[in-house]
Image (cartoon, rainbow, N blue to C red):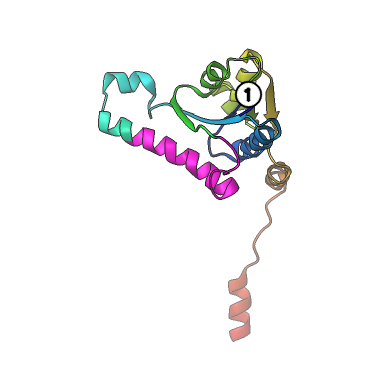
């Protein structure tokens, strides 16, 4: 690893994060940097719920599930962890945006995040990780858009929802007429 360079990437298992992971691998190879894939997670129900009713056995299962999701992201994108890179996988128990910004705390770091289409309701209820990182990071941030195919499928789905429904033909009448 030359010069202590690090490339951090937010991993969630989504299509957008897969695109970010692929870009981060390219950047880590290009700069001979340590690749740090980060999967940030919180307990189901949130931290407050867990503090009220902690179950250590469940916590160990959630931590293991986060590690497996990181492994799966590399398995699906590369067939496993690339052997030509130094990689430090980091499943962390923290909110994704703040976790990425706190970890990528050096101006020489690079932070790669995926962006995705989100509906208005989802934007109101959940903070965008990419927007948070772009606003708060102390290092350069690359925001990777979702793959073109995903955008095309989304556009097609929205277009199809706007078309009037077609009435299905009455096949039973045709079958009865044929019997006749």
**Residue at position x 53%, y 47% in the image:** 80
- Position of residue 94 measured from the top left corner of the image (x, y, whole percent): 45, 22
Quarter of the figure that contains the C terminus: bottom right
**Residue at position x 63%, y 24% in the image:** 5
Residue at the disc numbered 1: 5
- Position of residue 107 measured from the top left corner of the image (x, y, whole percent): 65, 14
**Image-quadrant location for residue 48:** top left
- Position of residue 141 measured from the top left corner of the image (x, y, whole percent): 67, 22
Magenta-drawn stretch, dominant element (helix, strand or loop): helix
**Image-quadrant location for residue 104:** top right
85 or 99: nearer the viewer: 85
Is 68 a magenta residue?
yes
167 versus 15 height, above or below:
below
Q: Which residues are magenta?
A: 61-86
Is 75 a magenta residue?
yes
Question: Among all residues in the image, which is located at the extreme front?
Answer: 2
9 or 83: nearer the viewer: 83
**Taking the image as drawn, is residue 32 in sight?**
yes
Q: Is residue 50 left or right of residue 107?
A: left
15 or 138: nearer the viewer: 138
82 or 62: nearer the viewer: 82
Quarter of the figure that contains the N terminus: top right
């Amino acid at each position: 690893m030359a010069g202590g360079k690090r490339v951090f990437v937010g991993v969630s298992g989504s299509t957008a994060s897969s695109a970010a992971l692929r870009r981060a691998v390219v950047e880590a190879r290009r700069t001979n940097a340590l690749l740090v894939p980060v999967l940030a997670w919180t307990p189901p129900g949130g931290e407050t719920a867990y503090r009220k009713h902690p179950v250590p056995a469940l916590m160990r299962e959630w931590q293991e599930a986060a590690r497996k999701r990181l492994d799966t992201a590399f398995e699906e994108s590369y067939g496993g962890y690339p052997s030509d890179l130094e990689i430090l996988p980091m499943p962390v128990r923290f909110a994704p945006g703040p976790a990425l910004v706190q970890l990528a705390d050096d101006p020489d770091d690079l932070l790669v995040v995926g962006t995705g289409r989100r509906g208005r309701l989802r934007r109101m209820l959940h903070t965008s990780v990419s927007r948070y990182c772009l606003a708060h990071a102390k290092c350069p941030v690359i925001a990777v858009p979702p793959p073109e195919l995903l955008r095309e499928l989304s556009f097609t789905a929205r277009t199809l929802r706007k078309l009037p429904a077609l009435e299905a033909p009455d096949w039973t009448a045709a079958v009865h007429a044929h019997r006749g």
